[in-house]
Image (cartoon, helix red, strand yellow):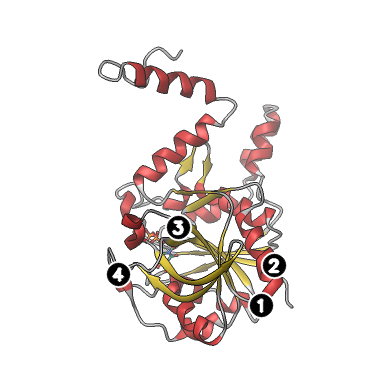
Amino acid sequence: MKIVKKAIIPAAGLGTRFLPATKAMPKEMLPIVDRPTIEYIVEEAILSGIEDIIIVTGKGKRAIEDHFDRNFELEQHLKEKGKLDLLEKVNKSSNVNIHYIRQKEPKGLGHAIWCARKFIGNEPFAVLLGDDIVQANVPCTKQLIAQYEQTGSSIIGVQHVSYEETERYGIIDPINNKDRVYRVRKFIEKPKLGSAPSNLAIMGRYVLTPEIFTFLECQEAGAGGEIQLTDAIQKLNEIQQVYAYNFDGKRFDVGEKLGFILTTIEFALHNEELASDVRKMLQRFQNNSSKSTLLEGIH
Ligand code: UTP
């Protein structure tokens, strides 16, 4: 069985839910505390044993390439000022090979993955969406790779959501499960409210066999007029069993405003430098929300 050493991070979407912020700034570069979202995702890939990452970018996404490039002037400046902790942070992701390909038009996630087909070749690969962060003791992608290594089949990360939320996700119709692994009858992208066969939702992490490209090649637009990865996975599932895995860990949806704000607060509450002030601030606000502003009385 071939091992999973490559990953695709699609980051070419328009980020319309964050407009106008994302008009000139990629949504994947919006910071959670002091690191851009995509850096958390690249870190998960590295910790999962991935050696080569291809980021699918598009128009207006240059900042992503600049972020993962060396910046010698900045490095020199930090060295001269003795700011070695910052220097280490700035160079954190320099141990992995990052490649880029452009999706000329944002035709959908399925199309973005298809754009990376030549880089992947005939190997299994991971996909990590550029706007989902997962915190887990064992990195989420590593959990999926471990499952892949048992069956040699594609495996899709899922978690439970409320039934009201199912219309926002790809949803699986599970046949049966063994521990956290499900055989799947059907994968359905954004089912209409009330029609979802389960509340197990696809959460932006996949390990796929290269046969998926055969289906992406001729995949027509689906939900939202976009070429959907879920639709191609369903076709793959008809010739080659695709499994779902209810991974362990907390997933943060940073691709929409409320999720982004909640993630920022939660990460700040776990940040050594900020935790105490942020906790004080929230406490004060909760005790007297009618009069307080968040900024009152911290320093
Ligand atoms: P989303 O649908 O969440 O991202 O795609 P979006 O389209 O940028 O956001 P909104 O809905 O307009 O606010 C999930 C991931 O897939 C990438 C996105 O960049 C995001 O990381 N994507 C999406 C592509 O790379 N290409 C596409 O054509 C669509």
Residue 169 lies in what quarter of the image? bottom left
Residue for badge 4: 224
- Amino acid on which disc 2 is placed: Lys
Return the x and y of residue 53 as percentages of the image width and height. 62, 63
Q: Earlier in the sequence, mark 1 or mark 3?
A: 3
Q: Residue at x 70, y 62 (%)?
A: 51
* Horizontal side of residue 175 vs 256, given as left or right: right
- Between circles 1 and 3, the one closer to the viewer is 1
Residue pointed to by mark 1 = 123
Marks 4 and 1, Cα distance to the nearest angstrom?
30 Å
Marks 3 and 4, how far apart in space?
23 Å
Q: Please provide percent x and percent y for residue 94.
A: 68, 51
Residue at 66% x, 45% y is: 92
How many tags in the picture? 4
- Residue type (three-letter) at the residue carrying disc 1: Glu
* Residue beneath disc 3: 61
Whether label 2 lies within 8 Å of ligand 1 gets the answer no
187 vs 19, nearest the viewer: 187
Instruction: Left or right? Give the position of 160 relative to 51.
Output: left
Q: Which residue is identified by label 2?
A: 5
Task: Classify mark 4: helix, strand or loop.
Answer: helix
Compare marks 4 and 2 and give the one earlier in the sequence.
2
